[in-house]
Image (cartoon, rainbow, N blue to C red):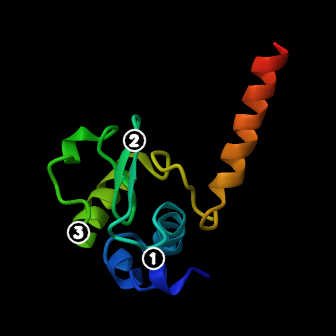
Amino acid sequence: MVSPQVEQWRWNVASRWPANEVDNALSVMACESGGNPNANALTDREDSRGLMQINVLAHPQWAGLNLFDSDTNLDVAYQLWQAQGWGPWSCKPGIPQGAMAPIAVGLAFAFAMWFLLG
């Protein structure tokens, strides 16, 4: 079950993805943006935009598009999914919103220990 902020996009997603992938797409959306079409993750390695967090540094062919527009974002996400499956997304189907944070913290801790202990 996804949040109402994500559920509101179900019909938009269902008009693009096959029926057996709609819940997967909504799961990825929940984890990536929480259903916020204005979400923007901006770092030195990432400029991910919109509902499905399309990273224009990794996919510069879409940098000139308004990826904060929900239809444009979902169109691009669908094209990317058709070409590469769920591989390009940090969040994979079935990972709940916010679930990646503890993984990132754990990896950072493991790296720090490796670095310190040599």
Which residue sits at x=31%, y=66%? 74
Q: Is residue 85 above or below residue 27?
A: above
Give the crowd class for mark 2: few <14, some 14-19, many >=20 residues within 10 Å: some
Q: Is label 2 in contact with label 3 (beta carbons under 8 Å)?
A: no
Q: Nearer the viewer, mark 3 or mark 1?
A: 3
Q: Amino acid at mark 2?
A: Glu
Dot 2: what SS? loop
The residue singled out by tag 1 in the image is 19
- Which mark is on residue 69? 3
The residue singled out by tag 2 in the image is 46
Q: Would residue 67 appear left or right of 78 to someone viewing this image?
A: left
Q: Nearer the viewer, mark 1 or mark 2?
A: 2
Residue 114 at x, y percent in the picture? 79, 21
What's the distance in space between the residues labelled 3 and 1, CA to CA?
Answer: 23 Å
The quadrant holding residue 110 is top right
Q: Is residue 10 above or below residue 107?
A: below
What's the distance in space between the residues labelled 2 and 3, CA to CA?
Answer: 19 Å
Residue 115 at x, y percent in the picture? 75, 19
Q: Nearer the viewer, mark 2 or mark 3?
A: 2
Q: Nearer the viewer, residue 39 or 95?
A: 39
Which residue sits at x=30%, y=55%? 79
Which residue sits at x=34%, y=38%? 58
Give the crowd class for mark 1: few <14, some 14-19, many >=20 residues within 10 Å: few
The answer to which of marks 3 and 1 sits earlier in the sequence is: 1
The answer to which of marks 2 and 3 sits earlier in the sequence is: 2
